[in-house]
Amino acid sequence: MRAIGYEHPLPISDPQALIETDVADPVAGDHDLIVEIKAISVNPVDVKIRASRPAPEGGPAVIGWDAAGIVRETGKDVTLFRPGDRVYYAGAIDRPGTNAQFHAVDERIVGKMPETLSFAEAAALPLTAITAYEALFDRLQVANPVAGAANAILIIGGAGGVASIAIQLARQLTDLQVIATASRPETEDWVRRMGAHHVINHRNPLSEEIAALGTGAPGFVFSTNGSDHHAGEIAKLIAPQGRLALIDDPAQFDIMPFKLKAVSAHWETMFTRSLYGTPDMIEQHRLLNAVADLVDDGKITTTLRENLGRMTAETMKNAHARIESGSTIGKIVLDGF
């Protein structure tokens, strides 16, 4: 089958950074689906892996962790899906990726595709929806209020893929005041469209921006990027006994300023359940189905911003370059081969 991969970690400007290649068709394990890929989206994790992780010996590395497609085969123990079902999912980081014609994935991390979306619109959602949902409800436990805190959440990096869906989930599934950050007119407009009650500028001191709002100290902060840069300001603005969740990869993060406030800090990595085969891995199947229902009920929308067309080495390199620029809004999607 055809796939997009790489032989060596290279800068995206290198002509060989991503190549179109032939690889063996996937074989279904006991709990696996074989999915014909109809659309994929590109995430920061794709860029990080391509630029840093060596390819396996004897073949190219095929990456990609977001897809929508049609089930073509099922493993012997599959019970949740059957051939012909339309599905969407984000895959597992320790298995070959979705940038291919066909893909093998464990059914327990796959959801039914929203009926009201195209494949491209659906492919924009899984990784970010899982990350945002787990961060809000498993890590921050936003359904459990912080005593004395403002009933609010600050989402840093509001126009990014994860934040775009986190804003929507917080609006639809909680009674929190949603405060998001943006620094350009176009990103501020996007964040408001996603449903933020308030927008503040992350180029200014965040504690001063929050104070100017007059909402009080939020009990929850979800930092999607720049966590090391904003750490001191987060420590100032968050309520005592508040909860902080992070998803980025700060080179350093000083936790000490949070001690006197007894702030709890939580990492969210949506690959943890599949990587370690946790007993609750099927929760990702359930939450993707819940997100699909919210979409079909008109309560949340796809975060697709750009569709770059059919999957080729050139369109994929274009997508990676845009992600590396750090200025994308929402999600970038490519159609299948």
Image (spheres, rainbow, N blue to C red):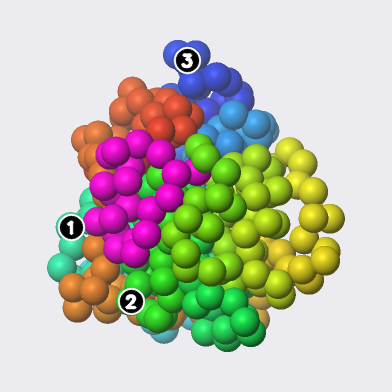
What amino acid type should be assigned to the residue bearing mark 1?
A: Ser
Q: Nearer the viewer, mark 1 or mark 2?
A: 2
- Tell me the distance, in whole angstroms, between the alpha carbons under discs 1 and 2: 22 Å
Q: Residue at x 19, y 78 (%)?
A: 297
Residue 172: give its label: 2
- Upstream in the sequence, badge 2 or badge 3? 3
Where residue 260 sits, quadrant-wise, is bottom right
Q: Which residues are magenta?
A: 183-202
Amino acid of disc 2: Gln
Dot 3 amino acid type: Ser
Label 1: how many Cα within 10 Å (few below 14, some 14–19, many 20+): some
Q: Please provide percent x and percent y for residue 28.
A: 47, 63
Q: Nearer the viewer, residue 94 or 123?
A: 123
Q: Is residue 42 above or below residue 150?
A: above
Considering the image in quadrants, where does the C terminus appear?
A: top left
SS class, disc 3: loop
- Image quadrant assignment for residue 226: top right
Name which of mark 1 and mark 2 comes first in the sequence.
1
Q: Position of residue 249 (x, y in %)?
A: 66, 44
| Residue 108 horizontal side relative to residue 262, left or right | left
- Which tag is nearer the camera, tag 2 or tag 3? 2
Mark positioned earlier in the residue sequence (1 or 3): 3
List the residue tagged with mark 1. Answer: 118
